[in-house]
């Protein structure tokens, strides 16, 4: 990597981390404490970072967890945000190796659905240790609905926003 490129990537990574910390502090997030919170665009910096590099995605995921720690202080929500590191690694390597997949609407939707499922599953698994003693079937279905179904929808919306920003920002480039 050339020196100018590495400075650009470092600067972009720092800006995305800053956004990942600031966005969770948005007062307009929807919260169903203690388990659930939905903040529109909270994943946009992370999805954007996936198009940059795996390391950028990991660092932005850590920044997002810090942002949720500062904004909520809720250990379950912070655990969910920390679980983003897993789907960030998977998604960024997927995009790195199959970057042309997002060139078509069908390919982009396929990626979005798959990464949204991985994302939602990681968040679901991050919350389970906090609620092991209170698990009932109705509670499991409630968690499933809020974390998996709504989480996937939230993830897919944020991915599409990020994709649009990336495509406008870098025009024909798929990765920096």
Image: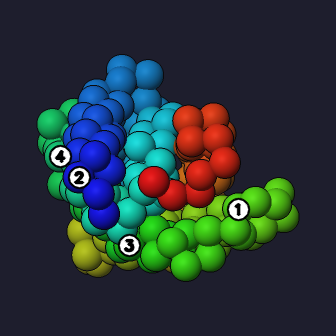
Mark 1 residue element: helix
Q: 10 Å neighbourhood of mark 2: few (<14), some, or many (≥20)?
A: few
- Looking at marks 1 and 2 on the same chain, the residue that comes earlier in the sequence is marked by 2
The residue to which callout 3 is attached is: 89
Q: Does 109 appear above or below 3?
A: below
The residue to which callout 2 is attached is: 3
Asked if the residue at tag 2 contacts the one at tag 1, i.e. Cβ–Cβ closer than 8 Å, the answer is no
> In which quarter of the view is residue 45 placed?
top left
> In which quarter of the view is residue 12 placed?
top left
Mark 4 residue element: helix
- Quadrant the N terminus occupies: bottom left
Between residue 149 and residue 82, name the one nearer to us: 82
Name the disc covering residue 102, or none: 1
Residue shown at 66% from the left, 48% from the top: 172
Asked if the residue at tag 2 contacts the one at tag 4, i.e. Cβ–Cβ closer than 8 Å, the answer is no
Q: Which label lies toward us, 3 or 1?
A: 1
Q: Which label lies toward us, 4 or 2?
A: 2
Q: Which label lies toward us, 3 or 4?
A: 3
Q: Position of residue 64 (x, y in %)?
A: 28, 47
> In which quarter of the view is residue 50 placed?
bottom left
The span from disc 4 to disc 1 (Cα, nearest Å) is 29 Å
Q: Position of residue 85 (x, y in %)?
A: 31, 67
Between residue 141 and residue 61, name the one nearer to us: 61
Name the disc covering residue 78, or none: none
Asked if the residue at tag 4 contacts the one at tag 3, i.e. Cβ–Cβ closer than 8 Å, the answer is no
Q: 10 Å neighbourhood of mark 3: few (<14), some, or many (≥20)?
A: some
**In the image, 38: left or right of 166?**
left
Q: Position of residue 68 (x, y in %)?
A: 25, 43
Name the disc covering residue 66, or none: 4
Mark 3 residue element: helix
**In the image, 17: left or right of 121?**
left
Q: Does 54 appear above or below 3?
A: below
């Amino acid at each position: 990597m050339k020196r100018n490129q590495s400075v650009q990537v470092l600067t972009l990574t720092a800006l995305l981390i800053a956004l990942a910390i600031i966005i969770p502090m948005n007062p307009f997030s929807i919260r169903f404490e203690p388990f659930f919170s939905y903040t529109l665009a909270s994943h946009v910096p992370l999805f954007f970072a996936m198009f940059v590099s795996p390391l950028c995605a990991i660092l932005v995921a850590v920044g997002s967890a810090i942002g949720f720690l500062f904004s909520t202080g809720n250990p379950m929500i912070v655990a969910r945000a920390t679980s983003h590191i897993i789907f960030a690694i998977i998604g960024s390597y997927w995009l790195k190796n199959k970057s042309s997949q997002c060139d078509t609407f069908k390919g982009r939707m396929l990626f979005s659905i798959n990464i949204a499922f991985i994302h939602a599953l990681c968040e679901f698994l991050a919350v389970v240790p906090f609620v092991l003693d209170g698990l009932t079937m109705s509670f499991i279905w409630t968690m499933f609905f809020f974390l998996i179904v709504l989480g996937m929808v939230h993830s897919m919306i944020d991915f599409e926003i990020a994709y649009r920003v990336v495509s406008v920002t870098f025009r024909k480039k798929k990765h920096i």
